[in-house]
Amino acid sequence: MMVKGSFSAVGIRWDYGRFIFGKRLEFNARGEFAHSLSGDTSSLDADTGIRYKLTDRATLNLSYGHDQVTGTRDSLNERTLTTGLGVIW
């Protein structure tokens, strides 16, 4: 989406990762939140997940993501749940 003009906003961004039980289980959270100073538009893009190390070459992943934009003509509110098996080459 292309937005014409400019506006002022404040935001916060985070990227956190933590190993639990040695390096067998990993928790991560990353995202960004922004809010316009005029108070009518905000956006959130956040993901959190866990990764479990099955073997030296394989991991099991589970993550949740939330994307939300409010205050515009085309508002967005999406949630995704992803699971997968990763292989290290």
Image: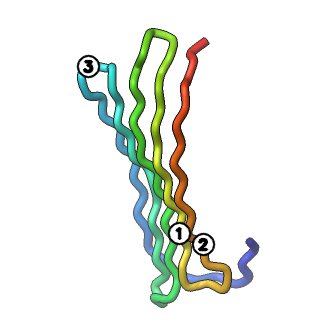
Nearest to the observer: residue 83 or residue 24: 83
What residue sits 46% from the left and 49% below the top? 64
What residue sits 62% from the left and 84% below the top? 72
Q: Which residue is mark 1?
A: 68
Of callouts 3 and 2, the N-terminal one: 3
Mark 3: few/some/many CA within 10 Å (<14, 14-19, 20+): few
Q: CA distance from mark 1 to mark 2?
A: 5 Å
76 vs 21, left or right, is: right
Looking at the image, the residue that sits furthest to the left is 21
Q: CA distance from mark 3 to mark 2?
A: 38 Å
Q: Which residue is mark 2?
A: 76
Which part of the image, by quadrant, shows the N terminus? bottom right
Query: Circles 1 and 2: CB distance less than 8 Å?
Result: yes
Q: Residue 14 location in percent, x, y?
A: 39, 52
Q: CA distance from mark 1 to mark 3?
A: 34 Å
For badge 2, the amino acid type reads: Leu
At mark 2, the secondary structure is: strand
Nearest to the observer: residue 76 or residue 35: 76
Q: Which residue is mark 3?
A: 22
What residue sits 42% from the left and 47% below the top? 48
Nearest to the observer: residue 19 or residue 25: 25
For badge 1, the amino acid type reads: Gln
